[in-house]
Image (tube, rainbow, N blue to C red):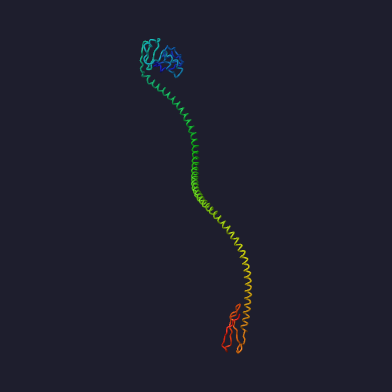
Amino acid sequence: MLRERLHALELADRSQLARLIADRPPVKASVFGRGEGVPAAAAAGLLPLASKVRAADPAAGGALADWLAGAYAVEGMPEEAARNALPAGAVLVNREGHQFTRHTASFHAPDPADAGLLERQAEIEALEARCGELEAKLAGEHANAKHMEDAAAAQRSELESLRAAIAERQTELHDAKIEHLILAQADERYRERSAQIGAGLQEMANEAQAARSALADSRSSLRGAEAEIGAARAQLASAESQHAAAQGALDERRRAAQQAADEARDAAFGERECGSKIADLDRSVQFYLEGYGQPTEVVVNKIDKDRIVGYISVPKAKETREPMKSS
């Protein structure tokens, strides 16, 4: 529909149009002046083709409105009734580029000169749209990356805090394990000591039972002993009485013994004196008997309490020895 108008040149000064006509170019060419387009009155029930086209430069909108005036968009092949209802000069254009009027039909075919340009233009527009999308996405990704960097920095800081906390927790865990080990050892010692104490308590209980039995026996024995002590005390009292009597008798006997000792001492003294006297008598008791020329000697061998044992030695002249007894 636009064909060579796609390559239209902007005519900055409209006064130059006469010069171009006087010296026209050797090929098909179109020029346009800057200006915004005015929407044309649309036929009832028809969609203007200009509503499907957007001018990148609003200043070219007037030229685009002029070129697309009377053109309406349609899908597929329009019906005969729709074509007959078209006003004069109106044209229907479908998606394939075919054009229909009330009485004519023009089929579109790509122009070798413009096909590549249109394709490149479409590609450029697609690339520009894609670039816009990518730039927006890139900006979003930059923002997201900045956000992620901030989040990563925060996470790194949090990671450092967590590492410090983990180290602290590991230290606490190590201390807790050591404390648990100490407590386990203490518990083991406690169990062993409890078992020992239990055995000691059982042994003490057995000993206490034995001691209670011994105490009962001792109390029974004590009662027997108390009875025996009572009897012994009675016997002691009797023995003390007897001892007092015996002591009196002993004292009496001691006095008698002392007296006897004194008497024995006096008797011994008298005996010694008697012995001396007897010795003196032995030496001097000599007498003469009638009819003997020599003295007769009295020999004393033993002196008793009531007798004296000895003999009389007479001279040999008579050869007679008679024993001497006296009382």
Looking at the image, is 179 positioned above or below residue 94?
below
The image position of residue 135, as x and y in percent, is: 45, 26
Looking at the image, is 191 positioned above or below residue 235?
above
Report the number of numbered marks.
0
Q: Nearer the viewer, residue 159 or 180?
A: 180
Q: Quadrant of the N terminus?
A: top left
Left or right: 98, with 187 as reference point:
left
Q: Nearer the viewer, residue 58 or 245?
A: 245
Q: Quadrant of the C terminus?
A: bottom right
Looking at the image, is 182 positioned above or below residue 74?
below
The image position of residue 18, as x and y in percent, is: 43, 13
The image position of residue 129, as x and y in percent, is: 43, 23
Q: Nearer the viewer, residue 203 or 29?
A: 203
The image position of residue 212, as x and y in percent, is: 53, 51
Which residue in the rendered view is the most extreme toward the front? 327
